[in-house]
Image (cartoon, helix red, strand yellow):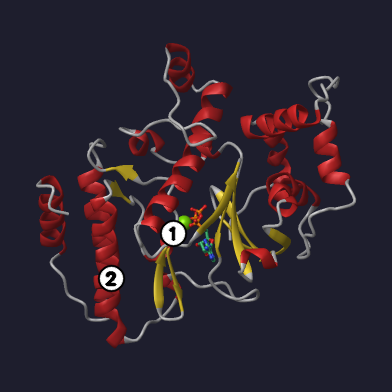
Amino acid sequence: MHYESYDEYDAYTHLPGMKQRVMREVRATGKQSTRSKDEPSEWLTSQVEGEDELPITYGAGASEERLLREALTIFYRDNVITEVVARVKGGKEANVYCCRAHPKTGMDLIAAKVYRPRIHRTLRNDAMYREGRMILDEEGKGITRNERTKRAIAKKTDFGQEIVTFSWIEHENDMLQKLHAAGADVPRPIAHEGSAILMAYYGDVNQPAPTLNGVDIERHQAAAMFDRLMWHVELMLAHNCVHGDLSPYNVLYWEGKAVVIDFPQAVVALKNPHARRLLQRDIDRLAQYFARYGVEKDTAALGNTLWQQFMDSEL
Ligand SMILES: Nc1ncnc2c1ncn2[C@@H]1O[C@H](COP(=O)(O)OP(=O)(O)OP(=O)(O)O)[C@@H](O)[C@H]1O
Ligand SMILES: [Mg+2]
């Protein structure tokens, strides 16, 4: 398991999401903050120290608790979640937590994916995935790329990197919304704000769903599961997307079903020059896993046919 020191989460208060949230609160209460730039806002302090605190019951360290309160209190106040009960996984770009759902949601558990600040440091080849994609702001709207913004992104100034960081999160949220609406086997999106995306949780409190690479499926399930995942690849392409990091590591296995996750790097198929290659890599990686169960496929032919149909607008 890999996660870094949580001290870096101090950086959160400098990100635009936090600033916007604080500003919204200032607007709502009509109070103009008199704090100096380096003092925590009254609102943040009350979020963190207030009586009605988000319960975090799995023994997180102090910095991680603070990060979680900053990222998830808004969902606690909105009666979406009632408690953070476990950290499912600490990833390179985000941590995923298991939360108890508020009864009004009609769900038992909710997964919260909380991005790390400065994820640009860990996203390899991020420019390749971003080609042909709009830079999105916190509302998920395209940012007008004026000269100043373009320069800031190219020069990787703090401002430019903040924009890019939030754009990744917005992009993942957008993909989840779009694919779920299209009937894809992806977690149902529940809510999104700032650095957190809430979605349906797969698994039990003590046993999160494993990823496909960690389970042995029955031989007789394999062919149908591969076909279903290929249908998924096709569905994404029909919506002008290539996952770009599809592999057994990004497929959850729960109650006999495969659920695809992890979309920040998904590319726009028609606009990204690497889309065809990434499509083939996605298909090859899936086929590699299923080959051990006797599923033999001509992956090059599968990729060619899908891409041709896509180019001929037949999907
Ligand atoms: N909806 C969910 N329900 C249950 N577990 C989940 C859910 N979403 C993610 N997970 C768990 O959290 C892990 C990390 O999620 P995800 O792949 O989206 O993030 P990541 O930051 O890209 O992580 P990594 O770098 O490990 O790929 C997954 O491998 C899975 O174990
Ligand atoms: Mg992943």
Q: Residues within 10 Å of mark 2 (few under 14, many from 20)?
A: some
Q: Secondary structure at mark 2?
A: helix
The CA distance from mark 1 to mark 2 is 15 Å
Q: Would you say residue 307 is visible in this rendering? A: yes
Amino acid type at image mark 1: Ile
Using the image, determine if residue 151 lies above or below residue 158. Answer: above
Q: Secondary structure at mark 1?
A: loop
| Relative depth, front residue between 274 and 292 | 274
Question: As drawn, is 89 to the left or to the right of 55?
Answer: left
Q: Position of residue 226 (x, y in %)?
A: 27, 72
Residue at mark 2: C-beta within 8 A of ligand 1:
no
Mark 1 nearby-residue class (10 Å; few <14, some 14–19, many ≥20): many
Seen from the viewer's position, the closer of residues 308 and 161 is: 308
State the residue at coordinates (37%, 82%). 217
Is residue 161 shown left or right of residue 223?
Answer: right
Q: Is mark 1 within 8 Å of ligand 1?
A: yes
Question: Residue beneath label 1, please?
Answer: 261
User: Where is residue 181, by image quadrant?
Assistant: bottom left
Toward which corner of the image does residue 128 lie, by quadrant? top left
Q: Which quarter of the picture shows residue 154?
A: top left
Rendering coords of residue 289 (x, y %): 31, 71
Image quarter in which the N terminus is found: bottom right
List the single residue furthest toward the top.
Answer: 147
**Three-letter code, disc 2:** Arg
- Looking at marks 1 and 2 on the same chain, the residue that comes earlier in the sequence is marked by 2
Q: Nearer the viewer, residue 283 or 194?
A: 194
Q: Is residue 17 above or below residue 116?
A: above
